[in-house]
Image (spheres, rainbow, N blue to C red):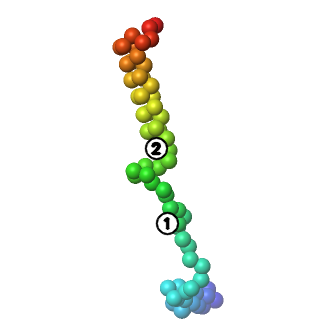
Amino acid sequence: MLDELRNNSIDDDDSLDFEGDIGLEIVDDQEQKVQKLFLGMTAVERMFISIFLFMNVAILGLAFLLATKRIVF
């Protein structure tokens, strides 16, 4: 009885052709997701770059004001 069931399942597997199937397709989310990259960076990377740039300008500006004695501590 089990031998017949095993033989039937093997025969059924050979008759199935999934390559010609036009059913539902599984699409990877990464393929559909379009990332908007500016200069090759993501939004978070651009945010950190802008924060670091702001900090550099603020520190250099403070150093320039101290050097020219416009402000005194």
In which quadrant of the rendered view does residue 24 lie?
bottom right
Q: Is residue 13 left or right of residue 41?
A: right
Provide the residue designation for mark 1.
31
Name the outermost residue toward the top.
73
Q: Give how far across and how far down residue 6 sits, in percent.
A: 57, 86
For badge 2, the amino acid type reads Arg
Q: Which residue is mark 2?
A: 46
Tell us which disc is closer to us: 1 or 2: 2
Q: Is residue 65 left or right of residue 20?
A: left
Q: Secondary structure at mark 2?
A: helix
Asked if 43 appears above or below 18 in the picture, the reply is: above
9 w.r.t. 59: above or below: below
Q: Is residue 67 visible?
A: yes
Please tell me how crowded label 2 is: few (under 14), some (14-19), or many (20+) other residues with Cα within 10 Å. Answer: some
Query: Mark 1 Cα within 10 Å, few/some/many (few <14, many 20+)?
Result: few
**Residue at (46%, 7%) from the top-left corner?**
73
Mark identifier at residue 49: none
Q: Residue furthest left?
A: 67
- Which quadrant: the N terminus? bottom right
